[in-house]
Image (cartoon, grey):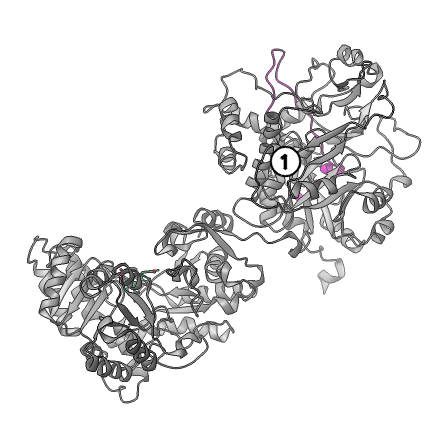
């Protein structure tokens, strides 16, 4: 069987529709008993005796004999399968405006009746609509309903009654002989024909033998003949009772009708002596008919269905009672009572069962029922999932596995979410429809225990965030620098097509096309060719430039959320101010659930999120450095973002994500909780051992002998004060161990934020060779994480990983500022805004009024971090070198990796959630 992760993606590929799964991705296939039974040795021998004459094949006569003998119809018209017979029958009997009554609809049967112009009326007995009712003949016609209909529309408008035995959609439920006799008597008096759907009539006959008074001594074959004698004709799908992979027939008593049928047959199926079948197929069906009525066969067949059903009943699973002939039907409406009918509980249950165990079942509820003539969804009384047992294929052990799987899904039923259509075909929609999960509002979800930290640039990629979110914890995408990450990905050929797939869903017209036009290189860049970069961000940029930022954030979140409905977050740096509003808007267009922001005080962000959710203009104050003060009395400099410039007529408001500022002090949390421009939903509380940028130590700066900033008592966050704010919080920085998680929880936190462990996992965006090198360094205890007070142009301490043999960016780099995310605005002597970065060429920085002392030891983080994810810029003086950052806990990664050379995000989650190691006493006990 394929793994859970593979089943997950198979299910997404199949649009949550079990009909669209590849059979190779299925473990136990209970989709249907139609054409899936195993043929016997006798049938296979018959296959070898195919007489493939175009006309008058010997095998046709064998089939005709078998049908006459066991079903009693004089005229036998072969069809390729059941619906072929339904098609012909509907066409010869129905006139537009007619009414057909039946003991519950069947999908193809009703579709052909409607296609011919009739309206179908369900006249099944009321007991059939009650899954728990033990009534033994739930397939019975409710005569009162039938009479009422005939009197209302007139007998001349009712060409025939469609009587099914057993009734598939009711749960494989039989009709009694007595009821059939009553229907016969009534219709005879009114000149109305009865057409039997004989598809599973043998199984019906067995139920009559078992349950109907006075029938216990008769053979199944005798009962079958009597049932058929109470009808004027029958449609048959040989793929069920008759044990063949393909084939069917139409049986009639009246020669004139049979002639009409044969006339149409040559048009739609084939000549009347083969009707769409090969001679060998007719031979196999003739033999299958004979085998199907053998008492031993039918007893063991229905006995196997009963075995599975009884196991489920014993486990308290709501199923249709009594257990039917060909399948066990789960009562999805009862099992998933938390999912409204509009969200198709049976479809969702079938998908959940596949995900759990690779078992394929079939929806038999509102999706199967389709829409009525007004276009509204039909909501049938029964909302079922069918576990259909092919004949002579599976063993009781398969039934045991199936029962156990259903029991597990039932136990975790609260986890199952509703579905909505992504594609809905106009007829028999259930076969080819595609679905997607109905997004569950983030407010209704439990808070995550683990937040995967947003590590930029591109380390917390969509692949990482998606992998984490799929486990039910919070995956977070880093939004920093995503626009250049996207255009570089496109210039590298977007090998798997992921970026282009997401781009095709971008709601702002024309943008994706324009970006593809300019940046997409189908085979990647020519060897040695540098990347084309984007124009640098400024206070005001063109609409087109903003749209690339919106697009890039949309793409990353869209991909992280694809195919599941678990929450995903985005992390942005407050300090990287200028692209933040378009980034947030892009992420929100893709439905981002959480926004996390640190590196500064994001006081204005909550209000901006409220505005963006309503597609309203949002503003942030732009920080502007000296040397020249702005003219006094002048409005403060602002960043303004107007969604209206991009989406003229948005369809509906966007979901306002939860906002979690990242803070390093309780005073900051208090300030944000009280003074932010809108709702703050919680905090990530980050200590100085976390990776990336850290807060500087409080008070007079002190340094170790190696020049690292020293943190002291004053830098320890007062958790008591945080708790008092009454908002959930997560601890970050050195919390990435099972003990760290437990300690956080006992300190009142909702969980932890973990970065470093995830940075080196298979799904992270870090270049594979860097992961390998660092993990080898960790195993050899040859890594060091140094807090560098100078490396970052922001002036915040920045953690740098040092590994034996890893070449990193250093002072020898020829300075060049062509990405510019860390540029800050300053005012020129002329009062204009300019932009500078302490890592840009020194003379330029000084020319812009910068202090030369600020440039010392500064690294170009933009280019180095791009290099970290394999998007190193190619320069004449050599490729840009990486600069790795990690939390202090990198050095203790061994406790987790234990010699592994690679691991997955799910491994990290499993490790963090692992129970405490047993203590000495407990081990002895
Ligand atoms: C089945 F999802 N049954 O049960 P054909 N009458 C009856 C049938 O059960 C039946 C046909 C006529 C299938 C296959 C199937 O919505 C679906 O040989 C009582 O399939 O043409 C077929 O016979 C039609 C599955 C049909 C469906 C329609 O699995």
Front one among 539 and 332: 539
Residue 741 in the figure: left or right of residue 224:
right
Q: Quadrant of ligand 1?
A: bottom left
Image position, residue 558 (x, y; %): 56, 40
Front one among 909 and 163: 163
Give the quarter of the figure containing the C terminus. bottom right
Residue drawn at x 11%, y 58% as measured from the top left: 263
Q: Is residue 763 visible?
A: no
**What predominant SS class does the magenta segment belong to?**
loop
The residue identified by callout 1 is 643
| Residue 875 belongs to magenta span | yes
Residue 486 in the figure: left or right of residue 696:
left
Residue 84 in the figure: left or right of residue 272:
right
Residue 873 vertical placement versus 121 (above, below): above
Residue drawn at x 52%, y 57% as measured from the top left: 418
> Which stretch did the figure color magenta?
871-897
Residue drawn at x 35%, y 64% as measured from the top left: 394
């Amino acid at each position: 069987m394929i793994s859970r992760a593979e089943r997950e993606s198979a299910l997404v590929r199949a649009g949550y529709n079990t009909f669209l799964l590849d059979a190779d991705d299925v473990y136990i296939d209970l989709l249907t008993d139609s054409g899936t039974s195993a043929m016997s040795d006798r049938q296979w021998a018959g296959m070898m005796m195919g007489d493939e004459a175009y006309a008058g094949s010997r095998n046709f006569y064998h089939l005709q004999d078998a049908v006459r003998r066991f079903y009693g119809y004089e005229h036998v018209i072969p069809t390729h399968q059941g619906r072929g017979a339904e098609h012909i029958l509907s066409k010869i009997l129905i006139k537009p405006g007619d009414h057909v009554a039946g003991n519950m609809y069947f999908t193809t049967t009703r579709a052909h009746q409607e296609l011919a112009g009739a309206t179908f009326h369900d006249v099944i007995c009321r007991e059939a609509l009650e899954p728990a009712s033990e009534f033994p003949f739930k397939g019975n016609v409710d005569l009162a309903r039938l009479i009422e209909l005939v009197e209302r529309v007139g007998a001349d408008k009712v060409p025939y009654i469609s009587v099914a035995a057993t009734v598939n959609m009711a749960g494989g439920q039989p009709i009694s002989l007595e009821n059939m006799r009553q229907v016969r008597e009534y219709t005879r008096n009114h000149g109305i024909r009865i057409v039997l759907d004989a598809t599973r009539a043998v199984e019906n006959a067995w139920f009559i033998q078992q349950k109907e008074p006075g029938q216990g001594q008769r053979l199944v074959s005798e009962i079958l003949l009597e049932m058929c004698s109470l009808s004027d004709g029958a449609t048959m799908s040989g793929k069920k009772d008759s044990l063949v992979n393909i084939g069917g027939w139409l049986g009639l008593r009246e020669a004139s009708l049979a002639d009409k049928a044969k006339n149409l047959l040559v048009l739609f199926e084939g000549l009347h002596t083969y009707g769409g079948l090969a001679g060998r197929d007719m031979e196999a069906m003739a033999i299958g008919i004979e085998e199907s009525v053998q008492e031993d066969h039918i007893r063991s067949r229905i006995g196997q269905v009963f075995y599975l059903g009884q196991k489920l009943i014993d486990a308290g699973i709501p199923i249709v009672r009594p257990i039917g002939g060909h399948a066990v039907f789960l009562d999805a409406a009862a099992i998933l009572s938390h999912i409204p009918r509009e969200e198709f509980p049976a479809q969702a249950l079938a998908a959940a069962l596949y995900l759990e165990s690779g078992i394929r079942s079939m929806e038999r509820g509102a999706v199967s029922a389709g829409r009525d003539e007004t276009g509204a969804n039909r909501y049938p009384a029964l909302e079922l999932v069918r576990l259909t047992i092919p004949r002579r294929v599976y063993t009781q052990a398969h039934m045991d596995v199936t029962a156990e799987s259903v029991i597990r899904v039932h136990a975790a039923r609260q986890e199952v979410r509703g579905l909505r259509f992504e594609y809905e075909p106009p007829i028999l929609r259930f076969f080819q429809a595609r679905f997607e999960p109905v997004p569950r509002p983030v407010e209704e979800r439990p808070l995550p225990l683990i937040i995967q930290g947003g590590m930029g640039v591109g380390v917390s990629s969509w692949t990482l965030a998606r992998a984490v979110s799929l486990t039910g914890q919070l995956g977070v995408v880093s939004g920093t620098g995503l626009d250049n990450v996207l255009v570089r990905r496109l210039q590298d050929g977007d090998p798997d097509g992921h970026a282009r797939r997401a781009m095709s869903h971008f709601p702002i017209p024309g943008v994706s096309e324009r970006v593809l036009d300019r940046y997409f290189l189908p085979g990647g860049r020519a060897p040695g060719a540098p990347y084309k970069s984007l124009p640098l961000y400024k206070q005001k940029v063109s609409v087109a430039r903003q749209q690339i930022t919106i697009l890039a954030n949309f793409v990353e979140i869209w991909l992280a959320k694809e195919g599941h409905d678990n929450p995903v977050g985005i992390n942005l740096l407050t300090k990287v101010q200028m692209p933040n509003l378009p980034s947030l808007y892009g992420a929100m267009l893709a439905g981002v659930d959480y926004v996390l922001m640190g590196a500064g005080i994001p006081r204005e962000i909550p209000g901006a999120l409220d505005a963006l959710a309503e597609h309203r203009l949002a503003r942030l104050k732009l920080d502007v450095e000296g040397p020249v003060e702005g003219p006094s009395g002048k409005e403060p400099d602002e960043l303004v973002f107007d969604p209206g410039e991009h989406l003229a007529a948005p369809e509906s408001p966007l979901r306002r994500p939860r906002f979690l500022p990242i803070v390093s002090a309780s005073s900051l949390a208090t300030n944000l909780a009280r003074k932010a421009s809108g709702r703050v939903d919680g905090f990530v509380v980050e200590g100085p051992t976390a990776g990336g940028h850290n807060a500087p130590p409080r008070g007079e700066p002190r340094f170790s002998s190696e020049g690292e900033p020293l943190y002291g008592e004053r830098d320890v966050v007062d958790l008591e004060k945080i708790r008092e704010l009454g908002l959930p919080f997560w601890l970050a920085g050195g919390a990435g161990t099972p003990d760290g998680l437990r300690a956080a929880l006992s300190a009142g936190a909702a969980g932890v934020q973990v970065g470093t462990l995830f940075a080196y996992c298979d799904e992270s965006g870090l270049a594979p060779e860097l992961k390998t090198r660092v993990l080898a360094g960790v195993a050899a205890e040859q890594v060091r994480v140094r807090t560098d007070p100078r490396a970052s142009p922001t002036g915040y301490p920045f953690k740098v990983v040092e590994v034996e043999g890893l070449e990193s960016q250093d002072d020898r780099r020829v300075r060049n500022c062509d990405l510019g995310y860390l540029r800050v605005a300053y005012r020129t002597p002329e009062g204009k805004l300019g932009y500078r970065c302490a890592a840009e060429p020194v003379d330029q920085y000084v020319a812009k009024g910068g202090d030369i002392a600020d440039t010392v030891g500064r690294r170009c983080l933009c280019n180095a971090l791009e290099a970290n994810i394999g998007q190193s810029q190619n320069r004449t003086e050599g490729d840009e070198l990486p600069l790795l950052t990690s939390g202090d806990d990198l050095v203790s990664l061994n406790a987790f990796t234990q010699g592994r050379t690679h691991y997955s995000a799910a491994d990290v989650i499993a490790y963090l959630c692992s129970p405490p190691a047993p203590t000495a006493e407990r081990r002895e006990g």
